[in-house]
């Protein structure tokens, strides 16, 4: 598919995770292995190259214990062909419109109040705060930084694939760290 064909295919509707997904995090277990990170995604793309992404982080593999909801809005920049599959495209997601965090578990509220209290109201269960452009240590963001990911996008048989996380938990913060494999796809809800 060309960039224009992908844009037309993904525009207008929602794309959601099939089931809770697992990713390696940058946090480590005592043996040095990456701790698992569980989430679900809900993504919409608008034809003006803007997007909305809602992520729910979970404490468990079955998605029964939600920790936090992230709401990210911004722009998609199309960077050209990606070699992972014919028709795959390099994309950059830039969270320049909104980046909101809502704690959904008391334990996560405690972590936020311990490690992300400067320049924020006291974190409360189910209360949303914007972290856009703010220092936010839990996600490694510094003051003034706009979150950006160097990603990939691929559409096949009504499934929307992005890049799989690196097994060492590295983020997609640079072109060199752009993913080289496909993640579990998202589908349109029925």
Image (cartoon, rainbow, N blue to C red):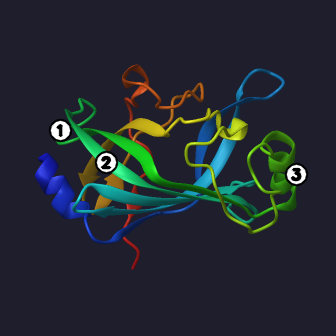
Q: Nearer the viewer, mark 2 or mark 1?
A: 2
Mark 3 highlights which residue? 110
Q: Residues within 10 Å of mark 1 (few under 14, many from 20)?
A: few
Relative image position of residue 10 (x, y in whole percent): 26, 62
Residue 102: image quadrant is bottom right
Nearest the camera: 27 or 60?
Answer: 27
Q: Who's the residue at 80% across and 58% down the image?
A: 123
Q: Is residue 139 left or right of residue 151?
A: right
Relative image position of residue 115 (x, y in whole percent): 81, 40
Q: Residues within 10 Å of mark 3 (few under 14, many from 20)?
A: some
Relative image position of residue 163 (x, y in whole percent): 40, 39
Q: Residues within 10 Å of mark 2 (few under 14, many from 20)?
A: many
Mark 1 highlights which residue? 86
Distance between the alpha carbons at the discs numbered 1 and 3: 46 Å
Nearest the camera: 73 or 97?
Answer: 97
* First in sequence: mark 1 vs mark 3: 1
Q: Who's the residue at 81% across and 46% down the image?
A: 117
Query: From the image, which quarter does the C terminus lie in?
Result: bottom left
Furthest toward the bottom, the residue is: 190
Pointers 1 and 3 in contact (CB under 8 A)? no
Nearest the camera: 96 or 186?
Answer: 96
Mark 2 highlights which residue? 76
Q: Who's the residue at 17% across and 42% down the image?
A: 87
* First in sequence: mark 2 vs mark 3: 2
Q: Is residue 160 left or right of residue 54?
A: left
Residue at disc 2, secondary structure: strand
Distance between the alpha carbons at the discs numbered 2 and 1: 20 Å
Residue 11: image quadrant is bottom left
Relative image position of residue 145 (x, y in whole percent): 53, 35
Q: Who's the residue at 38% across and 40% down the image?
A: 182
In the rendered structure, find residue 69 and report the number of the disc placed on it.
none
């Amino acid at each position: 598919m060309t960039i224009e064909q992908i844009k037309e295919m993904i525009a207008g509707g929602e794309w959601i995770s099939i089931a809770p997904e697992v990713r390696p995090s940058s946090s480590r277990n005592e043996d040095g292995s990456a701790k698992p990170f569980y989430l679900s995604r809900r993504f919409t793309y608008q034809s003006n190259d803007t997007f909305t992404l809602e992520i729910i982080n979970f404490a468990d593999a079955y998605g029964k214990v939600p920790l936090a909801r992230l709401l990210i809005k911004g722009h998609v920049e199309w960077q050209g062909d990606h070699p992972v599959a014919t028709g795959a495209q390099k994309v950059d997601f830039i969270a320049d419109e909104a980046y909101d965090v809502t704690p959904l578990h008391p334990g996560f509220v405690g972590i936020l109040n311990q490690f992300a209290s400067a320049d924020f109201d006291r974190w409360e269960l189910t209360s949303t705060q914007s972290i856009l452009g703010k220092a936010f240590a839990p996600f490694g963001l510094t003051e003034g930084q706009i979150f950006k990911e160097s990603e990939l996008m691929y559409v096949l048989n009504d499934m929307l694939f992005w890049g799989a996380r690196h097994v060492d938990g590295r983020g997609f913060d640079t072109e060199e760290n752009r993913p080289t494999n496909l993640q579990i796809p998202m589908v349109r809800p029925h």
